[in-house]
Image: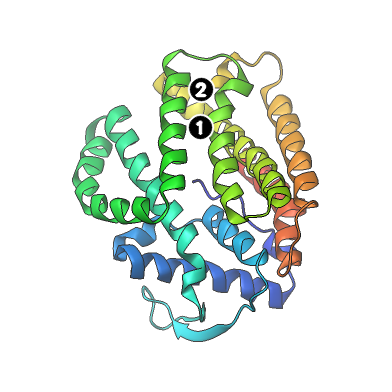
Amino acid sequence: MFGYIRANKAELKMRDYEIYRGIYCSLCRRLGKSYGLLSRLTLSYDFTFLALLHMSLKESCTVFKPGRCAFNPAKKCNYLQNGGELDLSASAAMIMLYYKINDDIKDEKGLKKLGSLIIKPLFSRAHKKAAAAYPDIETAVAEYIKSQNAVEAENCQSVDKAAEPSARVMADILSLLSGDEGQKRALDRLGYCLGRYIYLLDAACDFERDKKNASYNVLNYVPGDLKEYVTGQLYTSINEAAKAFELLNIKKHKPILGNIIYSGLEDTFKKELNK
């Protein structure tokens, strides 16, 4: 994923920021422990949000212990005492990375394609492990890649249709976070809106590069003021995501999640679109 689902750190209380950072660092450590050192390259705020949301739906307490960063031993970090709470997020990150590498091999040229060919064997074993642990995520991501490739192959001009695979994969992954049917429906809707937000923002951020490289970008077919259109669509996705979020039975870390949904998404897309 792309790191577009992140908190507005300036608006977080210090205690909440430390929890948020602690989960980010803990996910980094869990990736390394479960899938090897290089798997830490998959770390993003999107997967941190997934881990935070998963934990927030459970009654168990969030307990941290002090430690030091693997990449910078001089830096102190807080790590979750129960790292197993992060397994789903870590596995989702690994599965996503593996399919991204395959996609780059198919679509890219030159050094980028060569780099993907070189690193693919390094992640094949980790991917098999993650897929075996979470076959539902493996199925969802495989279907996402297949559907997204089909959309691009037909040169789809519908924004809704082009965004559907990204929206659907996020919906499928988030719906795994609860066994309660009512909560699953709310999570499905939240994931769908966040997936659509990610797709639209990424398409906007890649617009100039795709235009220069003559690559597919559905926003090429949007008439009128592009920034106005994208901004309106992003606000719609955020507002719908907020409605779904309010239906969830959040047991802890609600201020952090609320910050991400109500403030972080807007803050992020404004910063990205202004670059």
Quarter of the image for residue 99 reads top left
Q: Is residue 66 left or right of residue 252?
A: left
Colour treatment of the image: rainbow
68, 99: nearer the viewer: 99
Q: Residue at x 37, y 40 (%)?
A: 100
Residue drawn 19% across and 45% down? 118
Q: Is residue 14 visible?
A: yes
User: At 76% from the left edge and 60% from the top edge, which residue is drawn?
Assistant: 249
What percent of the width, then of the height, locates residue 223? 67, 13
Q: Tell me which label, 1 or 2, sits earlier in the chain.
A: 1
The amino acid type, in three-letter code, at marker 2 is Asn
Q: Look at the image and tell me in which quarter the C terminus lies.
A: top right
Image coordinates for residue 87, horizontal then vertical, percent: 45, 64
Is the residue 50 above or below the residue 113 in the image? below
Query: At label 1, which amino acid type do we have?
Result: Asp
Is any part of residue 275 visible from this angle? no
Query: Where is residue 202 drawn, in percent x and y?
Result: 55, 36
Q: Secondary structure at mark 1?
A: loop
Say which of 19 and 83 sits in front: 83
Per the rendering, the mark at residue 217 is 2
x 23%, y 48%: residue: 119
State how far apart marks 1 and 2 are (Cα).
8 Å
**Badge number at residue 206:** 1
**Which residue is more in the foreground, 178 or 128?**
178
Q: Are marks 1 and 2 in contact (CB under 8 Å)?
A: yes
